[in-house]
C-alpha cells in the first residue's frame, strides 16, 4: 500500500479519501490533450473540459515533493484512473478513455494543499471515428483474461488467508510467520484492483505509519507487528487476535464477492495504468523496505507486484503490438533483466532473503532496473488503446 493513501484505479466502483484539488482553466482541450502543472500548493489544468474518447493528461511536477494525479468519477470520490510517484521536475502522462459526463480531477502536492476536487466535464463529440475492429477485439479479450486472473488471485488469497489466520489465532506463531508473506503475495499481485475498493484497502493493508489519529488499526500489518514484535511491544491477547483475524477474513470474503460480481469489469486503459501502478508500488514501498518493516518480507511483495504488472502487459501486448512491436520488445528485455536480478535473492516457492540482508549496492541495482522497466511500462496504455 502506498504511503498515506489508498490509491485505487482499476475498478470503477472505487472510493477514496479527500485529495488536494486541481484548478482548471476555462478552456476546452483540443483532441483530448490536457496539460497539468503541479506545484506545492496544488495543480492547475490547461482546460476544464475535453471531448469524449481518449484523453491524455500530461502532468509536470514543478513542486518540491512527489505528487499524484487522479481522474475521479461523477461522485467526486470513485477513481477512474490515477498516476503516482511523479518526482519533482518530472513529467508523466495519464491516458484514459472516457465517455461524456461529469468528472473531477484531484492531485496531492503537499500536506497543506487544498482538499477539494475540481469539476471536469467530458463532452459529447459530433465527430465519429471508425472503430478499429481488430484492436477492439484484442482489448475486449484482454479485459476478459485479466478479470479471470484477478478472480484467480483473489480465490487463492481467500484460501491462504484462512490458513494463515488459523495458525495466528491458535498461537502457532512459527507457522503463521511462515504463511504471512506467501498469503500476501496474492494481494500484492492485484494491489491496484484491491485498492480500488477504498473501504477495504485501509481495513486490510494500512501501515501503522499511515494511521490517522484515533483510527482503528486492523489488517495484515497489525498482525505482522504482533508476530514480529519489536522491543517494548505489548502482545495482543487471544481475543484481540481473534478480532483482527475475523475482520481480515470478512474483508477478504467481501473482496471476493466484489471481484466476482456480474458488473465487475475493466477497461484496457485501466489494466495498463494498473501495471504502472504496481511498479510504482515497488519503487515507493518495497524497494525502500517500508512496506514490511517488522517482518522484512518486502521481496515477496516486490515479486508479486512485478508478476502482476507483467500479467497486465501480457494481456495488452497483442493490442500494443498493432501500434509497434518495439515497445513490447523493450518491456520484455527490461522485465527479464529485473526478473533475473530479483531471482538472485529467492523466489515465491522457496522464499526470499529478508530486506535487511540486501546491501545498499544491491538495493540500488534493483531500483535502477525497476525505474527502467517502469519507464517502458508507462507507455503501454497509449500503445494499446491508440
Image (spheres, rainbow, N blue to C red):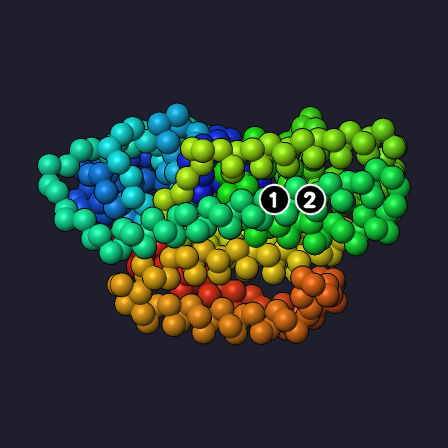
Residue occupying image coordinates x 31% and y 70%: 325
On the image, the x and y values in percent for residue 9 come to: 45, 42
Q: Quadrant of the C terminus?
A: bottom left
Query: Do the residues bearing badges 1 and 2 touch, measured as CB atoms within 8 Å?
Result: yes
Up the image or down, 266 lies above or below 380; here it is above
Numbered tag placed on residue 159 in the rendering: 2
Numbered tag placed on residue 5 in the rendering: none
Determine the image quadrant of residue 88.
bottom left
Q: Is residue 244 left or right of residue 269?
A: right
Residue occupying image coordinates x 52% and y 47%: 150
On the image, the x and y values in percent for residue 8 come to: 49, 40
Which residue is at the front of the view, 287 or 186? 186
Numbered tag placed on residue 155 in the rendering: 1
Q: Is residue 192 visible?
A: no
Q: Quadrant of the N terminus?
A: top right
Residue occupying image coordinates x 73% and y 41%: 162
Amino acid at each position: 500500500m502506498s504511503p498515506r493513501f489508498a490509491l485505487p484505479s482499476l475498478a470503477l466502483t472505487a472510493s477514496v479519501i479527500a485529495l488536494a484539488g486541481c484548478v482548471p482553466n476555462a478552456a476546452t482541450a483540443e483532441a483530448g490533450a490536457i496539460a497539468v502543472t503541479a506545484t506545492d500548493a496544488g495543480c492547475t489544468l490547461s482546460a476544464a473540459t475535453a471531448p469524449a474518447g481518449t484523453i491524455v493528461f500530461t502532468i509536470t511536477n514543478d513542486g518540491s515533493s512527489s505528487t499524484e494525479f487522479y481522474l475521479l468519477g461523477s461522485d467526486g470520490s470513485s477513481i477512474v484512473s490515477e498516476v503516482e510517484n511523479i518526482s519533482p521536475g518530472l513529467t508523466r502522462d495519464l491516458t484514459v478513455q472516457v465517455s461524456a459526463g461529469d468528472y473531477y480531477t484531484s492531485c496531492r502536492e503537499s500536506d497543506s494543499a487544498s482538499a477539494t476536487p475540481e469539476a471536469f466535464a467530458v463532452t459529447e463529440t459530433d465527430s465519429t471515428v471508425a472503430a478499429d475492429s481488430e484492436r477492439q477485439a484484442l482489448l475486449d479479450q484482454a479485459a476478459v483474461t485479466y478479470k479471470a486472473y484477478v478472480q484467480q488471485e483473489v480465490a487463492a488469497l481467500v484460501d491462504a488467508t484462512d490458513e494463515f489466520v488459523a495458525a495466528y489465532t491458535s498461537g502457532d506463531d512459527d507457522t503463521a510467520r511462515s504463511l504471512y508473506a506467501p498469503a500476501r503475495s496474492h494481494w500484492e499481485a492485484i494491489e491496484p484492483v484491491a485498492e480500488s475498493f477504498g473501504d477495504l484497502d485501509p481495513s486490510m493493508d494500512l501501515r501503522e505509519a499511515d494511521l490517522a489519529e484515533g483510527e482503528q488499526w486492523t489488517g495484515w500489518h497489525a498482525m505482522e507487528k504482533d508476530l514480529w514484535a519489536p522491543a517494548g511491544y505489548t502482545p495482543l491477547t487471544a481475543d484481540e487476535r481473534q478480532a483482527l483475524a475475523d475482520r481480515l477474513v470478512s474483508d477478504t470474503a467481501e473482496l471476493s464477492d466484489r471481484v466476482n460480481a456480474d458488473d465487475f469489469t475493466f477497461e484496457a486503459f485501466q489494466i495498463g495504468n494498473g501495471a504502472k501502478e504496481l511498479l510504482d508500488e515497488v519503487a515507493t514501498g518495497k524497494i525502500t523496505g517500508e512496506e514490511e518493516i517488522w517482518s522484512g518480507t518486502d521481496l515477496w511483495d516486490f515479486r508479486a507486484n512485478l508478476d502482476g504488472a507483467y500479467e497486465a502487459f501480457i494481456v495488452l501486448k497483442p493490442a500494443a503490438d498493432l501500434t509497434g512491436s518495439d515497445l513490447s520488445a523493450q518491456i520484455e528485455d527490461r522485465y527479464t533483466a529485473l526478473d533475473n536480478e530479483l531471482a538472485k535473492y529467492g523466489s515465491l516457492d522457496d522464499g526470499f532473503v529478508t530486506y535487511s540482508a540486501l546491501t545498499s549496492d544491491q538495493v540500488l541495482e534493483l531500483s535502477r532496473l525497476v525505474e527502467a522497466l517502469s519507464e517502458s511500462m508507462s507507455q503501454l496504455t497509449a500503445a494499446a488503446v491508440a
